[in-house]
Image (tube, coloured by chain):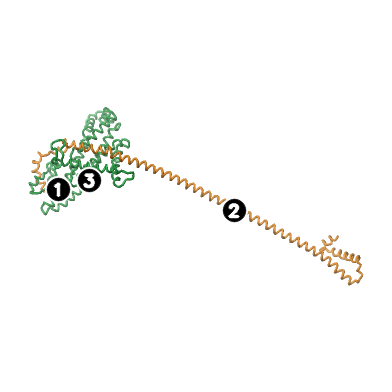
Chain colours: A green, B orange
Amino acid sequence: MRTDLRPPGVLLFTSATPSLIAASEGEGGFHAPSITDFFPPAILFEGTPFQIDRIWIIRVLATVVLLSVFIVAARRAKLVPGRFQNVIELILDFVRVQVAEQILGKNDAKKFLPMLTTIFLTILAFNLTGLVPGLNLAGSSRIGLPIVLALWVFATYWWVGISKHGLGTYLKNNLFPPGIPPFVYLIVTPIELLQILIIRPASLAIRLAANMIAGHIMLVLCFAATHFFFLEAAPAMKALGFLSLAGGFAFTAFELLVAGLQAYIFALLAAVYISLSLEEEH
Amino acid sequence: MTALQSAAPVVVAAEETEVSGLALFLPADYDLLWSTVLTVVIAFAFYRYVLPRFNVVLDERTAKIEGGLAKAEQAQQEAAAALAEYHQQLADARAQAAQTREEARAEGAAIVAELRTKAHDDAQRIVETANRQIEAERQAAAVSLRAEVGILATELASKIVGEALEDSARQSRVVDRFLDELEASPVAQPVGAKED
């Protein structure tokens, strides 16, 4: 690809809108993914804080499905689980054992388990919408939701740290780690402050959104290319469609992995940050 | 990909006014609002209903499993106790059987010994009785023989000597003398002694 010669961002931020491509290629043409995908036109209340668009619909749908599944599972929960309940319990157990208890220990895990479960499942559900035909866009690919969840984590680890140690001790624990020569604090303390104020929540939110955006772009690229090669490209290039279709399959599988992985990482780091606030000294 | 490649330079200029890349990471107000609403809804459902409900079920299951384990352990202990008791009984029974057999053997030996002694005694008694009978018969024979010998001898002598010996007193004397002579021989000793 000749575009490799440019900075990679150029493709992402400036690639063609359908109309422009159509103009250069004639009717139909190649629909390249672009960031306008993440800002679909408003359906209702345009320009107000209550604006409703395609992503809103996707998120509401994901929320409804998630809550339906888990509320039905909870309502039917029995002592001896059936197949459905086993799967649901497997997911809940995963959060409890692999995330909460692993990081926080059994005692603290109990207190933060609802939060970690909510975060994990919300992200998982919203990530998976990117793979659902017809939706094709992750609910977590627009930064609002990752930011809300990251702020929740941010507020929680500050609140936990302050309510356990008091503001002074909490800051001292975090900003002046013991065991290093005093002059190093000149460097360490600003970094740590930046860390607990900005880097932690920002990295949580951006990591999640960026992963989902990149995933969407890769999938759209593969499938749009397949469509173009099969239906509109010159006969000699049609065979390339198989290659891009195979790429689409591979990236779908990869996105499935990423969807779970990002949910896991977000919940895991939330637990880690909380545990860092709880620690006496580190 | 040729389409993209040919389009890209054209697009660079045209697109920048529409949505800047930074917008991807700067949230819009409606985005934040609805994200918050949905997060709160989901969190509410999980905090209030889903997780407590599952906790109840899980706790109940844990209790049940622990109860079941305790019961199983108790049953196992009982079974072990029963087995030990059974083994004990078996060992007791074996010991008792061995003892009984030993006693029986001893008793049998005693009985055999007793019978042998008794048989021996009986045999001895039978032999003694037989001896005594033989002796008695021998004596009877001797007595009868003595009388008959006397008569025969007297008759014989009478025929030889004639009527001379018919006088009973004399006859008696002759016989006695004859018998005394007979008794002088060692074999007839007891008869002679009795006669005295």
Give the structural element (helix, strand or loop) at label 2.
helix
Front position in the image: A190 or A168: A168
Work out how far the residue at label 1 is from the one at label 2, CA to CA, in angstroms.
104 Å
- Specify the quadrant of the image occupied by residue A55: top left
Work out whether disc 1 and disc 2 sit on a shared chain: no
Disc 3 from disc 1: Cα separation: 19 Å
Residue of label 2? B104
- Three-letter residue code for mark 3: Leu
Q: Is residue B18 left or right of residue A92?
A: left
Residue A188 is situated, as x and y percent measured from the top left of the image, at: 23, 31
Report the residue marked by disc 1. A224
Disc 3 is placed on an element classified as: helix
Q: Residue A256 carries which label?
A: 3
> Horizontal and vertical percent for residue A11?
13, 43
> Mark 1 — on which chain does it sit?
A
Q: What residue type is labelled 2?
A: Ala
Q: Which residue is drawn at 76% across and 61% down?
A: B133
Give the side of residue B72 with respect to residue A89, left or right. right
Which mark is on residue B123? none
Residue nearest the observer in this picture, B84 or A32: B84
Badge 3: residue crowd in 10 Å (few <14, some 14–19, many ≥20): some
Q: In which quarter of the image is residue B159?
A: bottom right
Chain under label 3? A
Tag 3–tag 1 contact (CB < 8 Å): no
Asked whether the beta carbons under mark 2 and mark 3 sit within 8 Å of each other, the answer is no
Tag 1: amino acid: Ala
- Mark 1 is surrounded, within 10 Å at the Cα level, by few (under 14), some (14 to 19) or many (20 or more) other residues, namely many
Q: Where is residue A195 in the image (x, y as percent from the top left)?
A: 22, 33
Judge from the rendering whether residue B113 lies leftward or rightward of residue A6; answer left or right.
Answer: right
